[in-house]
Image (cartoon, rainbow, N blue to C red):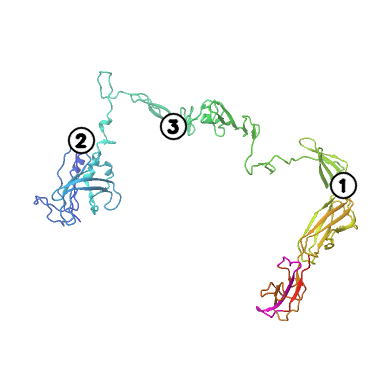
């Protein structure tokens, strides 16, 4: 590493330093430099490998013009190249100050163009490129500071840092005779004058102070006399314009630039209100108390009012009565917990009103109101009812012997008046007037479908004939026994019912139609039920002799010509003997085509090994 030399001294520019500061200013820094001897008049080092404790001869003091900054540090050193030869000419050097010997961010830096002598030596004034020189704060804490030098040439790195000791900290001493960086003369009391052309004295005029304990003092004149301000402190309480009781008591109005105010009551725009808190007059929120209200715990305000307006005039929009707790919207005298002078609107999904009895209403329609009803003596319990247009609700007992009329007599009660019962008659109500039967196999019975006949009249219902079936496909529909059959042998009392069970057995594969007819003593006397079926499904059943070997199944092959059954089975059966419908071809439930002849063979399969085909069987599907 190239050898280097460093000498640092403080430069004085007429600084008025204390004796200790001046002594420190003459101290020198020497570290890690070759030793010089008095016998070497040329200043060359006699041993470039001298120990780090050798001392560098201090540089002579340098005087500066008062026009130059005083916060400068002299630094001297020398530069050699990698071969140990002195550098010459002019080079750019960057000087940086750090808080530590290694690492960390630089605290201060500057770059100077430095002229080297024939021995590679140079001397610079650190801070000379800055208008303010070296910053005083750099050494204010007294913490160590390290100086590093870097030659601004390609391939060069920052040299080993040098510790700055006593001399730089004398810069801090230059501030010892100042206050806030200003000399004492800046704080000398200005002398008073005796008028134009008069003489001045350096004495301060006599003043008279009138402070009282507990008050925040203030200057009462230009001569510096002190007196009481309006602010008083009693314990932890502050009072402005009055002796405080609460944490902050103010006698008078408080106004902020954005419109917060209290003062005399006035509802005009931007008004200040007595015992009131207002936020921005034209869009005001007011808290208004009575005139000269006493502010005590629990009795702060009697009314809370919210104002609105157009910036010129305002009006009270909402009021909260502190005594009753009532809230008024559009009125200043709310008579109930919530009084609204105007329309009240509910908007949005789920908006509703919850009543005290738990009723939740989203609409005013059909609101249930509890009313007292006193029925007439001739109306028995268990009544039926119907609406009588324009008069009320007609009620009739279950046995048809007692009737009444329910009408609204006033806003709080309903009146049930006696009424003449109409002549008792049976009324038929059918559970269905059309039955649709699903598709089933041809010549196979469907599940039963039921028609229920209910007597909703007031007299017994009787049948003059048993239920009958007519129509083009009547033969394929039939009735079956039910628990309460509709027949001529039994009547159906008022409120009771009977039933008819119907079964469909298709004889062909087309849609079938029929009609169920009921004849009784009701009006009208004939009730009809239409019967409709989906087309029947054609099928072919295969039967034969089962194998005596356990585990045998049967593959069925089909074709439309003799010997054309193919080698792929269309389905598999587990038995051939149970019934014709045990091993049955329905063309996967879609039915076989009417008029077509089908040919079949069967193989027995044991452990996936089929037998030879059976004899060939054939079947022709009827039309339709």
Query: Which quarter of the image is occupied by the C terminus?
Result: bottom right
* Tag 1 residue: 400
Q: Earlier in the sequence, mark 2 or mark 3?
A: 2
Residue at 48% over, 34% down: 247
* Residue in the foreground of this view, choosing between 425 and 414: 425
Q: Which mark is residue 187?
A: none
Spatial CA distance of label 1 from label 3 is 92 Å
Residue at 25% over, 31% down: 185
- Do the residues under discs 2 and 1 have CB atoms within 8 angstroms? no
Q: Nearer the viewer, mark 2 or mark 3?
A: 2
Query: Which quarter of the image is occupied by the N terminus?
Result: bottom left
- Which x, y percent locates residue 344? 64, 35
Quadrant in the rendering for residue 606: bottom right
* Tag 3 residue: 233
* Tag 2 residue: 67
Q: Considering the numbered disc 3 on the image, is that residue within a helix, a strand or a loop?
A: strand
Residue at 80% over, 36% down: 409
Q: Nearer the viewer, mark 1 or mark 3?
A: 1
Magenta stretch bounds: 588-613
Spatial CA distance of label 2 from label 3 is 54 Å
Spatial CA distance of label 2 from label 1 is 128 Å
315 relative to 62, above or below = above
């Amino acid at each position: 590493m190239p050898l280097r030399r460093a000498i640092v001294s403080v430069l004085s520019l007429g600084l008025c330093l204390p004796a200790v500061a001046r002594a420190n200013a003459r101290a020198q820094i020497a570290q890690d430099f070759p030793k010089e001897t008095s016998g070497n008049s040329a200043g060359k080092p006699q041993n470039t490998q001298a120990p780090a404790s050798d001392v560098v001869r201090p540089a002579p003091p340098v005087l500066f013009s008062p026009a130059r900054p005083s916060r400068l540090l002299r630094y001297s050193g020398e530069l050699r190249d990698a071969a140990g030869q002195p550098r010459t000419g002019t080079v750019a050097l960057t000087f940086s100050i750090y808080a530590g010997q290694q690492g960390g961010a630089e605290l201060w830096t500057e770059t100077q163009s430095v002229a080297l002598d024939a021995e590679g030596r140079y001397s610079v004034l650190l801070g000379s490129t800055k208008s303010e020189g070296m910053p005083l704060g750099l050494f204010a804490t007294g913490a160590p500071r390290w100086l590093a030098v870097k030659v601004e040439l390609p391939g060069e790195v920052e040299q080993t840092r040098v510790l700055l000791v006593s001399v730089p900290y004398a810069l801090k001493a230059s501030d010892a005779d100042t206050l806030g960086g200003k000399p004492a003369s800046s704080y000398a009391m200005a002398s008073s004058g005796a008028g134009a052309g008069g003489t001045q004295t350096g004495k301060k005029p006599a003043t008279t102070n009138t402070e009282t304990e507990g008050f925040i003092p203030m200057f009462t004149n230009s001569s510096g006399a002190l007196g009481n301000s309006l602010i008083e402190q009693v314990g932890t309480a502050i009072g402005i314009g009055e002796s405080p009781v609460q944490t902050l008591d103010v006698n008078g109005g408080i106004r902020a630039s954005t419109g917060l105010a209290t003062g005399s009551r006035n509802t005009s725009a931007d008004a200040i209100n007595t015992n009131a808190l207002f936020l921005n007059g034209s869009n005001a929120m007011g808290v208004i108390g009575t005139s000269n209200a006493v502010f005590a715990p629990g009795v702060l305000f009697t009314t809370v009012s919210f104002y609105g307006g157009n910036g010129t005039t305002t009006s009270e929009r909402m009021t909260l009565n502190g005594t009753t707790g009532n809230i008024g919207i559009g009125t200043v005298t709310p008579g109930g917990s919530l009084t609204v002078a105007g329309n009240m609107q509910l908007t949005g999904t789920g908006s509703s009103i919850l009543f005290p009895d738990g009723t939740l209403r989203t609409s005013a329609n059909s609101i249930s109101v509890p009313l007292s009803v006193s029925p007439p003596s001739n109306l028995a319990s268990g009544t039926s009812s119907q609406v009588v247009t324009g008069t009320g609700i007609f009620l009739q007992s279950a046995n048809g012997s007692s009737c009444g009329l329910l009408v609204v007599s006033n806003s709080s009660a309903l009146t049930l008046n006696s009424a003449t019962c109409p002549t008792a008659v049976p009324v038929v109500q059918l559970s269905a007037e059309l039955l649709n039967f699903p598709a089933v196999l041809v010549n196979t019975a469907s599940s039963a479908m039921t028609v229920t006949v209910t007597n909703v009249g007031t007299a017994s219902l009787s049948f003059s004939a048993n239920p009958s079936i007519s129509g083009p496909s009547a033969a394929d529909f039939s009735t079956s026994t039910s628990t309460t059959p509709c027949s001529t042998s039994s009547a159906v009392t008022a409120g009771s019912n009977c039933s008819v069970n119907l079964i469909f057995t298709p004889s062909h594969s087309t849609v079938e139609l029929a009609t169920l007819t009921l004849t009784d003593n009701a009006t009208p006397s004939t009730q009809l039920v239409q019967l409709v079926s989906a087309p029947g499904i054609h099928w072919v059943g295969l039967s034969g002799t089962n194998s005596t070997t356990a585990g045998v199944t049967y593959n069925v092959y089909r074709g439309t010509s003799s010997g054309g059954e193919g080698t792929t089975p269309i389905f598999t059966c587990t038995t051939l003997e149970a019934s014709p419908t045990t091993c049955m071809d329905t063309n996967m439930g879609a039915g076989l085509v009417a008029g077509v002849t089908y040919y079949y063979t069967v193989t027995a399969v044991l452990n996936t090994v089929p037998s030879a085909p059976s004899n060939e069987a054939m079947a022709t599907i009827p039309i339709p």
